[in-house]
Amino acid sequence: MLKPLPDKARKSHEWTETDIENSQIQWKKGSCTDLVVPLRKVLVCPKVFQVRDLHTKSKAGITNGDHVTKLVERLDKETDLDPILVLPISANRFVVVDGTHRRAAYAQRDRQTIPVRIFTGTLSEARIAAGRSENAKRKLEWTHQEKSQYLYQLILERPRHPNGKPWTHKECAEAADRSERMARHMERFIRRCKDEGKPIPEKWTGGAWSSDEDETESAEERLARQFAEKLRAALGPLTSPGKARALGIALGQYTERADQVALALVEAGGLRDVIVEGVDEMIAEQAEEHAEAMQAQAATRQYLSGLSAAVGAGF
């Protein structure tokens, strides 16, 4: 028996995790998972699966228009793009797990069909797959800030497995490609907000809140936004790690306050835990190397002592 679709008065871009969970169907074992289906039957649910920006106002879930343009250009030259990953729901329809921008490219070219790959796991597993997707992390080059924001959203929502158990900190961290330590830090921050009667921010701020709750944008934030707009207009997108590094070096040459700039980047990107982890790993490696060196020295002393005793005995 087919499950009913969510309230028809609400479009798919308004659906929540509960809506999809109630309409998901089990894909038959042994059935083909690579299909070509009508585009109109492939729905987008950005509130559940748009991992780069869960608050995007785009009904199609698009967060990077330039990426869609490039995909359209590829589609003009090729027969098809890579299959998008979808979750089957009732009424012979599908929800995009990974491939929102590819679907948008097909829609822009008025394609009637699109190749899909059926995801046969649970909704929770599908959300993890969306976060881990090669497309989301590498082709669209997630920033540390975007990964942190996605992790924060997962900690706020705490998706549940079919047995009702919430995702662990480790599962949330793996889905967002961040550390379990950061997930726990976010959990503590949310708990502190509740305990102190503070509003819980929708966006991750590195674990701090504004002293003036009514302030919408401080003078510093406004100046930062203006700087960002000017840099974006002058430099365009940073499309490679090399360009990002070159910008960092250029900022160091531009100002004697590069240390303050670096600290602001760490705070804005929520990178404190990442740096602490890196330092911890470096200290652990140095301690291990020191221990190995001490063992080698002890072995050398023991060997020389034995050699000296042998010489003294007349050997």
Image: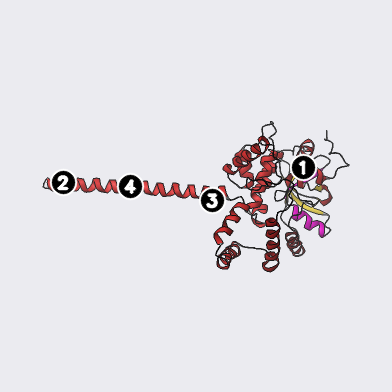
Circle 3 or circle 2, nearest the eye: 3
Image-quadrant location for residue 161: top right
How far across and how far down the image is residue 303, in percent?
Answer: 23, 47
Q: Is 162 displayed left or right of 177 in the figure?
A: right
Q: Is residue 267 above or below residue 91?
A: below
Q: Amino acid at mark 1?
A: Pro
Disc 4 marks a residue whose amino acid type is: Met
Res 275 label: 3
Q: Which of pointers 4 and 3 lies earlier in the amino acid sequence?
A: 3
Q: Secondary structure at mark 4?
A: helix
Q: Nearer the viewer, residue 294 or 45?
A: 294
Identify residue type, mark 3. Ile
In the picture of the structure, the residue carrying the numbered disc 4 is 294
Rendered location of residue 281, percent (x, y): 48, 48
The residue under label 2 is: 310
Mark 1 to mark 4 CA distance (whole Å): 60 Å
Check disc 2: other Cα within 10 Å, few if <14, some if 14-19, many if 20+.
few
Mark positioned earlier in the residue sequence (3 or 1): 1
Residue 88 image label: 1
User: Is residue 240 at least partly visible in the picture?
Assistant: yes
Q: Earlier in the sequence, mark 4 or mark 2?
A: 4
**Residue shown at 15% from the left, 46% from the top:** 310
